[in-house]
Amino acid sequence: MNKALSFWVGATFCAMTLPMHPQDGGWRSIKVPAKIEVSQVLSECPNGWQQYLPSVSHLFIDVMVYDGNPDKRALLAPDSETYNKQTKKGTSFYKLHPVMKDGIWISCSYYLTKVQVCMKLPEGTSELRVYFDKTIPNNTKIYQVEYR
């Protein structure tokens, strides 16, 4: 019995944008989609069961950095990280030296779905900063992503 789900990412999310005005030291912000709309369809419902699709917002929860397209699975770890125990805020720093020919990519994860959105960073991007907040226990919130 095939219980596979098919996924569709709706067009009701904010587009990732790369602004034209550099910030301090040439840093540019990436506006990640705050949420995505996902439609899930059950391919086959098991006998005696019926499909139930609760209405859930799929809010942004994490960003991952890859050397190459995310389907290559070359996930990068931060080179360093700072964290202030009093403010409970920190920054992950990436020094980017792409090995794969298709450059550096980021992928955004969302609450209660496997569906992600990803994008390639501009050629020549050499650094990335990811700002996070841990003021809510067991809940790291990413609030800014920048590159240069």
Image (spheres, rainbow, N blue to C red):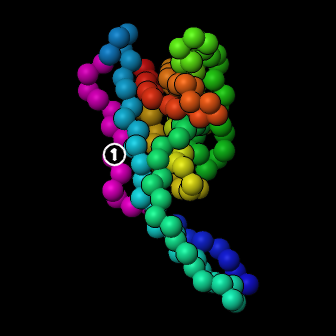
> Residue 101: percent from the left, percent from the top?
56, 38
Quarter of the image with the C terminus in it: top left
> Residue 87: percent from the left, percent from the top?
53, 14
Residue found farthest to the right: 1
Dot 1 corresponds to which residue?
Answer: 15
| Residue 139, magenta (yes or no) | no
Q: Residue at x 52, y 32 (%)?
A: 141
Q: What amino acid is found at the position of numbered circle 1 in the picture? A: Ala
> Residue 56: percent from the left, percent from the top?
47, 59
Q: Nearer the viewer, residue 128 or 53?
A: 53
Q: Quadrant of residue 81?
A: top right
> Residue 132: percent from the left, percent from the top?
52, 25
| For residue 5, side relative to residue 146 (left or right) | right
| Residue 9, magenta (yes or no) | yes
Q: Nearer the viewer, residue 132 or 71?
A: 132
| For residue 53, side relative to residue 27 (left or right) | right
- Residue range corresponding to the magenta coloring: 8-22
Mark 1 crowd level (few <14, some 14–19, many ≥20, 10 Å Cα): few
Q: Residue at x 60, y 71 (%)?
A: 5
